[in-house]
Image: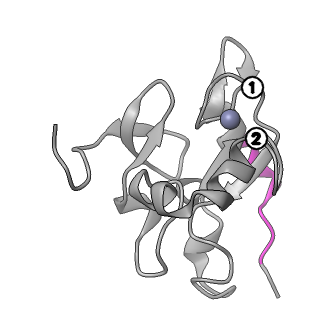
Amino acid sequence: MTKQITARTRTVVRHRAERGGWPLCERCGSALGTNVHHRRPRGAGGSKDPATNPPSNLLLLCGSGTTGCHGWIESHRAIAYQHGWLLRSWQTPIQTAVRIHDRGLVLLDDIGGMTPALPLGDAA
Ligand SMILES: [Zn+2]
């Protein structure tokens, strides 16, 4: 059984994505975020893993499974891993940086916050 994302968690993620009162896509920032995306897929950590549904593992994205940023991530998986939009099964969401459109690389916490992170891999 896949544990559902709670209404409270959805609210935390939506508020994190809000800019000027609008919940924007956390990847592109140029469209409304309409879809909650799992950075570490539900199947990868096992549905019993409590790390599957906290805010740090979730992104609000535009599009659906085939359109917008949600579709883009699914069709550009190698790049998505580099930017933390997708995680490997062994990566911990709260400890793995993700690129947010207007914040750069950040670490997400589980109460809707984010803090700047050092670049992954190739430093500038
Ligand atoms: Zn987008």
Cβ of disc 2 within 8 Å of ligand 1?
yes
Of residue 27 and residue 7, the one placed in the foreground of this image is 27
Q: Earlier along the polypeptide chain: callout 1 or callout 2?
A: 1
Q: What residue do we see at 37% from left, 51% from top?
A: 97
Residue 111 inside the magenta-drawn segment: no
Instruction: Using residue 65 as the reference point, say whether residue 88 is left or right of it.
Output: left
Q: Residues within 10 Å of mark 1 (few under 14, many from 20)?
A: some
Q: How far across and how far down the image is residue 98, in percent? A: 43, 48
| Residue type marked 2 | Gly
In the image, residue 63 above or below residue 38: above
The Cα atoms of the two marked residues, 1 and 2, are separated by 9 Å
Q: Name the quadrant of the N terminus.
A: bottom right
Q: Secondary structure at mark 1?
A: loop
Q: Which residues are magenta?
A: 3-11
Q: What residue do we see at 68% from left, 76% from top?
A: 42
In the image, residue 119 above or below residue 103: below
Q: What residue do we see at 81% from left, 57% from top?
A: 65
Q: In this figure, which residue is indicated by the disc labeled 2?
A: 68
Q: Secondary structure at mark 2?
A: helix
Question: In which of the image's four quarters is ligand 1 placed?
Answer: top right
- The tag on residue 31 is 1
Q: What residue do we see at 49% from left, 80% from top?
A: 89
